[in-house]
Amino acid sequence: MKFDPSKFDPANIFDFQLAWDYLPFILGGIPMTLLITLIGMSIGLILGLILAAARNSKNWMFRLPARLYISIMRGTPVLVLLFILYFGLLMLGIELTAIVAACLGFGLASAAFIAEINRAAFNSIDAGQWEAGRALNLSYIQTMRKIILPQAIRVALPPLGNVIIDMLKATSLAAVITIPELFQKAQMVAGRTFDSMTVYILAGLIYWSLCLLISFAQERLEKRYSKFL
């Protein structure tokens, strides 16, 4: 690779007028990006809680399948999973819409990471907390809801915040299965204007702004649950 200083023009790095003109169009992809993130994270949280319980089970019939699922999903790229769900299942006669395939793909993949986060959070709670619940004649569900979960959530929040931020950024992969999310709209503008540098810098700034909002919400939740220290 060679660099030719004579062809370098700082003005070509970012065209503010172009960015301003196409900003509304690119921002139009945010609702789809957030929708995929929200649904995918919801699937991941529910499935991740079930997997964490199965992973901690003393019954190998629950524990081994959970470990196998977690291992496979942690070792499979999300892009591969999206292609399997959107294109591969067609060979079995199963046709999913692009949005359903994306939500399922991100949800199934994130569940593996969330399961390990939940498992670590539950294991961090002292066994005496369960004994305290029994001493107060609380049921399993009451002990979990009133004693264990508030403490486990405080431990799990930082890594869960990282998962949702990673998922938000990874939704850009949904562009390959024709979903009109933020990154696909940026690609359309780049192809139309031939100014890839400006458009992709703009897209990066938008993703960064969304991640800052998530980080702010995470910090607020951490302060809320800090009383359980």
Image: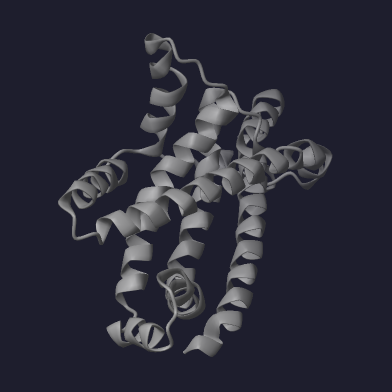
Which residue is nearer to you in this view: 79 or 12?
79
Q: Residue 133's quadrant in the figure?
A: bottom left
Which residue is nearer to you in this view: 70 or 80?
70
Residue 88 vs 62, above or below: the answer is above
Residue at image position (31%, 42%) is 73
Which quarter of the figure is the N terminus placed in? top left
Q: Position of residue 101 (x, y in %)?
A: 51, 29
Q: Residue 148's quadrant in the figure?
A: bottom left
Q: Position of residue 160 (x, y in %)?
A: 47, 63
Residue at image position (52%, 56%) is 164
Decide if residue 217 is on the left or right side of residue 41. right
Residue 214 vs 144, above or below: the answer is above
Decide if residue 117 is on the left or right side of residue 228. left
Residue at image position (55%, 39%) is 172
Q: Residue furthest left?
A: 60
Q: Position of residue 192 (x, y in %)?
A: 70, 24
Residue at image position (33%, 58%) is 52
Residue 229 vs 58, above or below: the answer is below
Give the number of callouts: 0
